Amino acid sequence: MAFGKKKQYSPEPFNQETAAEENGYTEVFEPVSEPVRKSDYAFKVRNLTKDYDGNVVLNNISFDIPSGKIVGLLGPNGCGKTTLMKILAGLIHDYTGMVKIDGRPIGINSKAHVAFLPDCTFFPDRFRTIDCINYYGDFFEDFDKVKAIEFAARFGLDLNQKVKTMSKGMKEKLQLLVVMSRSADIYLLDEPLGGVDPAARSVILDIIMSNYKENATVVLSTHLVNDLEHSFDHILMLGHGTILVNTGIETLRSTGKSVEEIFKEVIGDAWEVD
Amino acid sequence: MLGKLTKNTFKANMSSVSNVYLAMGIIGIIMLGLMVIDWTKWGDTGIGLGLVIKIIASVALCLTAAVGIIMTLTGIIGEYNRNMFGAEGHLTMALPVRSSTLLLSKWLAGSFWVVLSYLVLCVCAFGSFIYVVKHSVNIVQGNDMYYSVYELVIEMVEQLCYSAGIATPSVAVLLSLASIYAFDGAVRLIVLVLLIFFAITISHCRPFHKIGKFGKILYFFGGFLAVNVFSSMITKFIKIYIIISETNYTFTLSSAEVAAAWDLGFGAYAITNLYCTAIAAVFVFLVTTVLIDRHVNVS
């Protein structure tokens, strides 16, 4: 299958429940009643559909993610990981379906509790490192400026260096440090290891894993399944616009296979293209 | 939050337009230099090459200021587009602030820079006018007819009023009228900034994004037309005037009173169109807010 090509996927063969039965790793979605506490589920998504000019990216997906988990959002290129992240972060509005974050609809309240790290550079070129830190401090009450400055020193970032003069890797580190300096309830990290060298990956991973707020939910989208699979508590695998796997890591491990093996098995041909 | 957002947008706009103002300043200094040089020392009699250069310099100064408005608008458009819907939008749109606060901050900061460039244009135009008049005085002085600049301007106004068949207003009334016209211009520029923001915003909404870059221009003129049609229709039915005397301002709906006011040397100004434009602007603001809230995507 040519996954890199722009193509409109036919939703029929990838019906979520059919996929669940076929791959055997998805806990078939059963509509749940309202959770006992508001924060039992970090995300509650119902019948979410999003298309780009007729090209369906997310096709009527429904899932719940329990709070306090480290969630691996996996899938081949173009499967809708970034779109899903953007919807959860409140950057995409023209979708159908219901999305709730910690029991709240997406809006100011949800944004105040979500720390989002996109897969692109979002700070203006004119900003210096310290300007980025101050900006976050201005708008997010849960931001720890001292922690951010410490991270900057750890990453070797000069507080007065302008974003314009930074390399791609430095920009990614800068963005990661401001996001991880928040005490958010939910962290959405879109490809946090995408542009950094292998040596820096363990440092970044260590910073992510040791700095998120206790009981917070961390969603990590990545292609580097091998590097991260031991960190995940929960796996959400997307493909062909639908949920292919949505289950806890223990359930997956009980099969005796690694997440990467399951990923290859479920995604199939798409993995080879990646 | 509004204050912090406005401060940040103000700085971002300053970064975009600072080069424009720097260029305007340099050109302005060169033009002023050409205007103050005593060309007679260079063998000019006062009505030859020196005069031509001075007039060209004063016109160039005004043109530079006019281009400054366009460049300022361009900078604000670029900043809004980048900061709301481009890569920077991943940060801006993820902030825990209301879309109305976000839009208002952009509008306030953008309006400040546009109105500032408008004031620069007004100062340049007025300064050039006085300069040219003063220069004319020098020429007339050569014919033994002495006028001060002030007297010459007043005489010009008297001639205009005579042509229009009305009494010449006093200086105080003239200044009040000039202030109201300047205010009117500023308000329209501020509304223009909002219409531009509306056009950019709607061009990022489905299905309006399909037209592409051309769509922004189309939506801007669509919005501009809608606001003006609305204002004109209301103005057709209700005309409210403000009558300006030396001591106070009074409002009236009567055209006869307005005509009488002009005959008495007072000033009058129809404000219906202006406040209808302001009402339409509020509506455009609300629509843009809803679009940001519910329909736009950050690409």
Image (cartoon, coloured by chain):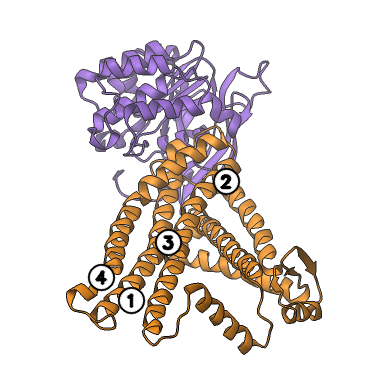
Chain colours: A purple, B orange
Q: Chain of mark 4?
A: B
Q: Position of residue A95 (x, y in %)?
A: 54, 44
Q: Earlier in the sequence, mark 4 or mark 2?
A: 4
Q: Secondary structure at mark 4?
A: loop
Q: CA distance from mark 3 to mark 1?
A: 22 Å
Q: Which mark is residue B38?
A: 4
At label 1, the amino acid type is Ile
Does B71 sit left or right of A199 as displayed? right
Q: Earlier in the sequence, mark 3 or mark 4?
A: 4
At label 3, the amino acid type is Ile
Quadrant where the N terminus of chain B is found in the figure: top right
Does A217 sit left or right of B257 as displayed? left
In front: A197, or B52? B52
Q: CA distance from mark 2 to mark 1?
A: 42 Å
Q: Which mark is residue B69?
A: 3
In front: B62, or A134? B62
Instruction: Tell me how many marks there are.
Output: 4
Residue at left offset 76%, top offset 77%: B261
Residue at left offset 50%, top offset 16%: A216
Which is in the foreground here, disc 3 or disc 4?
A: 4
Residue corresponding to mark 2: B104
Q: Which mark is residue B55?
A: 1
Asked whether disc 4 touches disc 2, contact meaning CB atoms under 8 Å apart, the reply is no
